[in-house]
Amino acid sequence: MKKEMPEGFFWGNSSSSMQTEGAWNEGGKGPSVYDVDTAGRIAKNWQVTNDNYHDYKGDLDLMQAMNMNMYRFQISWSRVVPDGDGEFNEEGIAFYGRLIDDLLERGLEPMICLYHFDMPLSLAEKYNGFLSRHVTSAFVRFGKEMMRRFAGKVKYWIVFNEHNLYFADGFEHYSGVLKEELTLSDMYTVFHHTMLAHCELADFLHQNSDAKIGGMLATTEVYPASPAPKDNLYLRKFDEFYNRNLCDVYAFGHYSHEVLTFAKNHEIDMDFQAGDEEILRKGISDFISFSYYRSVLLDATDLTDDDAPNSYLTKGMKLNPLLEHNQWDWSIDPDGFRRLLGKLYNEFGLPVFPIENGIGQEEKWDGVNEIVDDLRIRYHREHLKAMQAAIFVDGVEVLGYLGWGLIDIPASSGAINKRYGAVYVAPDTHERIPKKSFRWFQQVFGANGDNL
Ligand code: BG6
């Protein structure tokens, strides 16, 4: 029997505002932690990037030409509320209003993300970002206003990009915390505050519109490094803290009992106040979305129960010698993608939505010849086949597939040498040059994925 992809499946592109917009100090935008060097913590140059603030229409035309029907972008908090908790900036809001209209005009369904690591600078400096309830309330105020303005037209929403990273060792600055040493109580507090914000906004969206909202995880599939039962035991615990604890809230409205037991045993104060339980219970999500690029191994030899599970990977991560890797040692693992799709759907019962996938490669255009990115084509083809096996063989409900940065954008480090795109963006001139994979995506998306 021939298996056909569902009608209305979403095919598209995904980005963040700090990786696309530029115009860091124009149109009334206030600085975010990404725009300046805050005490050496985040020294990146995000001031121009793809210059989409000045000119995004050409990129929308390219997405349309690739036969996409969805674009996930981010509304920058500091463009809309320059200092994070003060006046709204109508010029910034109007920019996103135009972008949404221009997307809809081209048959591209917008998906909005409200936070992608770029805390308004003054809130980071004054309050240490999401460590503060005041900042959490300011963010919810911003989010609700965006929903009031746009939920009539925008039917898909994400609150926090890669929400589990706010809980992970080494990613503290993603939540706007400038404090140098974070205690476990600090990390749990940041995480709890962001989860409250997610749930409050999910409830608000449901009360006021027919739009859908998703939780969003950074997923790296992790396998045990050996057949040792200890590797498997700690891998299970890692999954409980890093993924399932969030999905428990998205799907069931409460934290994992194992995580709460760890917090109790370690006298962690996560600022759990009266009324919080109710907020979590009411903020159920409509789908679980995630980024997926690679898998790794966990070697638990040196781990004990005193280690916080959110630091297991810092201590025990290994590369899988059986897999091919890119130049940054990110493995290529389509089976991991299928495994993840099935796991999330079976365990939590919500539709799943991969909204970031792709492979970073170093590429230079010689000014004449097409960039032949065969590895990228192979990467996406294998991942799409794995996704189809998840849909047709494993019975998973998948809403769509969005590639990451399919028009080149700087990597999370700020460097432009790690490119994910089907379209090359020339340094300095910002000229757009389709690569070989552009034509491949065009055919695959145009055929609704039925011609892999
Ligand atoms: C995700 C982020 O972690 O992965 C993006 O949401 C990031 O911001 C992407 O760009 C790819 O990672 P990197 O480090 O290769 O840019």
Image (cartoon, rainbow, N blue to C red):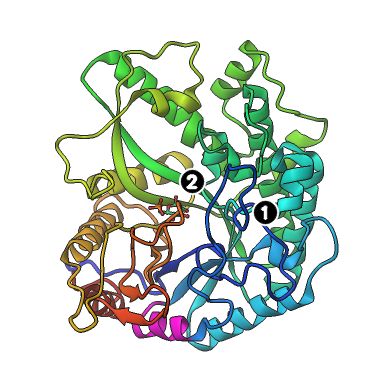
Q: Horizontal and vertical percent for residue 11?
A: 38, 70
Mark 1 closeness class: few <14, some 14–19, many ≥20 residues within 10 Å:
many
Residue at coordinates 17% horizontally, 41% vertically from top-left? Answer: 323
Q: Quadrant of residue 261?
A: top right
Residue at coordinates 76% horizontally, 35% vertically from top-left? Answer: 276
Q: Which residue is mark 1?
A: 202
Q: Quadrant of the N terminus?
A: bottom left
Asked if one can make out residue 281 in the rendered structure from this viewpoint, the answer is: no
Q: Secondary structure at mark 1?
A: helix
Q: Is residue 93 left or right of residue 35?
A: right
Q: Is residue 11 above or below residue 163?
A: below
Give, as a three-letter code, the residue at label 1. Ala
- Disc 2, ligand 1: is the CB inside 8 Å? no
Q: Which residue is mark 2?
A: 217
Residue at the limit of the structure toward the right, as seen here: 87
Residue at coordinates 33% horizontally, 60% vertically from top-left? Answer: 417
Q: Which label's residue is closer to the chain start, 1 or 2?
A: 1
- Mark pair 1, 2: CA separation: 16 Å
Q: Horizontal and vertical percent for residue 212?
A: 59, 62
Q: Horizontal and vertical percent for residue 102?
A: 56, 85
Viewer-side residue, 328 vs 101 = 328
Majority secondary structure of magenta residues: helix
Q: Is residue 184 above or below residue 125?
A: above
Q: Does the segment drawn in magenta span residue 59?
A: yes
Residue span colored magenta: 58-68
Q: Quadrant of the C terminus?
A: bottom left
